[in-house]
Amino acid sequence: MKANDILNIHNLKRTSCREGIIEIVMIAKQALSENEIRERLAGNYDRSTFYRSFKTLEEHKILHKIIVDNQLVKYALDNTVTHKVEHAHFYCNECNAVQCMNDVPVQKYQLPDGYSDIETEVLIKGRCANCKNQENID
Amino acid sequence: MKANDILNIHNLKRTSCREGIIEIVMIAKQALSENEIRERLAGNYDRSTFYRSFKTLEEHKILHKIIVDNQLVKYALDNTVTHKVEHAHFYCNECNAVQCMNDVPVQKYQLPDGYSDIETEVLIKGRCANCKNQENID
DNA sequence: CTGTGTGCAAACACTTTGCAGGTGT
DNA sequence: ACACCTGCAAAGTGTTTGCACACAG
């Protein structure tokens, strides 16, 4: 599935900015921040354009946002595109990488009477495999 | 345990601002935002003072921060004060309340090889018991 | 052609910081 | 007495918005 196809499916105009964002995020092995995406994108788009694009792509469930500690915001492809279930996110305290743990499904939590859950966000903080390897090399 | 005792234990100066914040948060049944705390506090403290106080109280694990969607920031008493285990947080989409689900412990997630977890944050979004009752009344 | 996306500049909200003066111990 | 806390003002950062123009369908 190409970026253009995704836009078509959602009846979104195929602009180079949207196309670029989706391509970058599809290639990436990690979730990326606005800055990281902008750096990797050839065209010099305005930041407001980026924010508007993210918003649109998020509303159409093409991307999802992962937020760490109220400051770090990263984006990744959404479940509806990757066909994966609701999954946990991982944040590495050492390299600041954010990853979707597609193999770590979010567990069902038993809530007190009267509470209903619609969505559950799980963010696991720790050290990623890559940083562990780095340590061994040193 | 009084606010003053908590400050003493942590060797923090007993200023009226810190004392007030702790008292408000102890009474509250929900997590409160900076604004909510400031409204309920008699003294008119500067916002920067608030932020510095929150930071101090957080560093001493007296309070903890709960963040929803990168915009809504609320504070609650920390585990070390309440002696509760790591718990899930609940956000009500209807009334925007944030609560510590002290009876909903965070589950252990099995991570891929090489990953180690230090801390896990769970935020469940849905409708709280209070809002469900409101609906029945109408 | 028409509606929507974009760039620019300005506004906004939250948070942090430097400094001078006040307060707790 | 001294360290640390506070208030004030300013700066920093991420994000949003109004407007005129450009572009996709």
Image (cartoon, coloured by chain):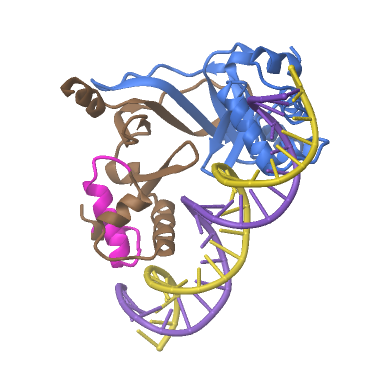
Chain colours: A brown, B blue, C yellow, D purple
At 66% from the left and 12% from the top, the residue drawn is: B9
The C terminus of chain A sits in image quarter: top left
Q: Is residue A10 left or right of residue B92?
A: left
- Please state the horizontal and vertical placement of residue A50, each as a whole percent of the image: 39, 60
Magenta stretch: includes residue A49: no
Which is more toward the observer, C3 or A95? A95
- The mark tally for this picture is 0
Residue A25 in magenta?
A: yes
Say if A110 sits above or below D11 in the image.
above
The residue positioned 75% from the left and 31% from the top of the image is: B17
The image position of residue A6, as x and y in percent, is 28, 56
The answer to whether D24 is drawn above or below residue B57 in the figure is below
Depth order, front residue of A45/A102: A45
Q: Residue A87 falls in which quadrant of the image? A: top left
Q: Is residue A115 left or right of residue B117?
A: right
Residue A93 seen in render? yes
Q: Residue furthest right?
A: B42
Question: Residue drawn at (32%, 18%), measured in percent from left and top?
Answer: B110
Q: Nearer the viewer, residue B27 or A57?
A: B27
Q: Quadrant of residue B33?
A: top right
Residue A127 image offset from top left, x and y in percent: 32, 25
> Can you give x and y, in whole percent of width and height, for residue A75 in the image?
36, 46
| Residue lying furthest left | A137
Q: Nearer the viewer, residue D5 or B84?
A: D5
- Residue A20 sits in quarter: bottom left
Dominant SS of magenta comes to helix
Report the residue at 54% width, 34% height from top.
B125
Q: Is residue A8 visible?
A: no
Q: Which portion, as a residue range, is magenta? A: A5-31
